[in-house]
Amino acid sequence: MKIRNLVELFAVLPEDERIIVDVLRQIIVETLPAYCKEKISYNVPFFYGNKGICIIWPSTVPRGGIKKGVLLGFWYGNKLNDHDHFLSHGTNKQIFYKIYHTPEEIDDKPIKKLLKEAIKLDSSFKKVS
């Protein structure tokens, strides 16, 4: 399976995952500054500025390491000040994440707080030219 855009991604997702992905994307898109971009990478939405910021990985897409739900992963989660212990970290030492099983679980406040933290971190990385 090679997904090239959001239309193709939404076509393969079950409705609950599609809604969760859509809500998370809206929160991310409205929070990230203009210099940040979104692309489909590894068949899932990937957001980056100078380096990777976050990724949304639905369990329907293979190789995400989750069996159910949708993972919101922060690329440099290990460097974020997650005072509220909102994120989990599994075996990956760098990517910290939160898994959503229903759209009702999504609270935009902690997500936006972490995104702002991730943006601050991203702006400290030198742009590779």
Image (spheres, rainbow, N blue to C red):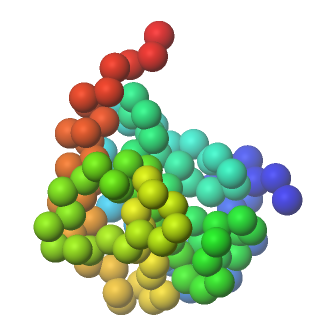
Residue beneath the point at 26% across and 74% down: 86
Residue 103 rendering spot, x and y as whole percentages: 42, 84
Q: Residue at the spot x=57%, y=42% of the render?
A: 39
In this view, 41 is above or below 50: below
Which residue is at the far right?
Answer: 1
Left or right: 59 in relation to 93: right
Q: Is residue 36 above or below residue 101?
A: above
> Could you say where residue 38 lies in the image, as x and y percent from the top left?
50, 43
Can the viewer see residue 13?
Answer: no
Q: Among all residues in the image, which is located at the extreme left?
A: 83
Closer-to-camera residue (129/36): 129
15 is higher (above) or lower (below) than 24? below
Q: Position of residue 22 (x, y in %)?
A: 48, 68
In this rendering, the answer to whether 94 lies above or below 108 is above
Give the quadrant of residue 110: bottom left
Quadrant containing the N terminus is bottom right
Q: Is residue 117 left or right of residue 22?
A: left
User: Residue at 32% of width from left, 27% of height from top?
Assistant: 125
Residue 37 visible at all: yes
Horizontal side, residue 76 vs residue 69: left or right: left
Number of marks in the rendered image: 0
Picture quadrant of residue 128:
top left
Question: Residue, x 51% and y 61% (percent of image)?
Answer: 92
Q: Camera-side residue: 57 or 38?
A: 57
| Relative side of 43 to 31, left or right | right
Q: Position of residue 54 (x, y in %)?
A: 43, 52
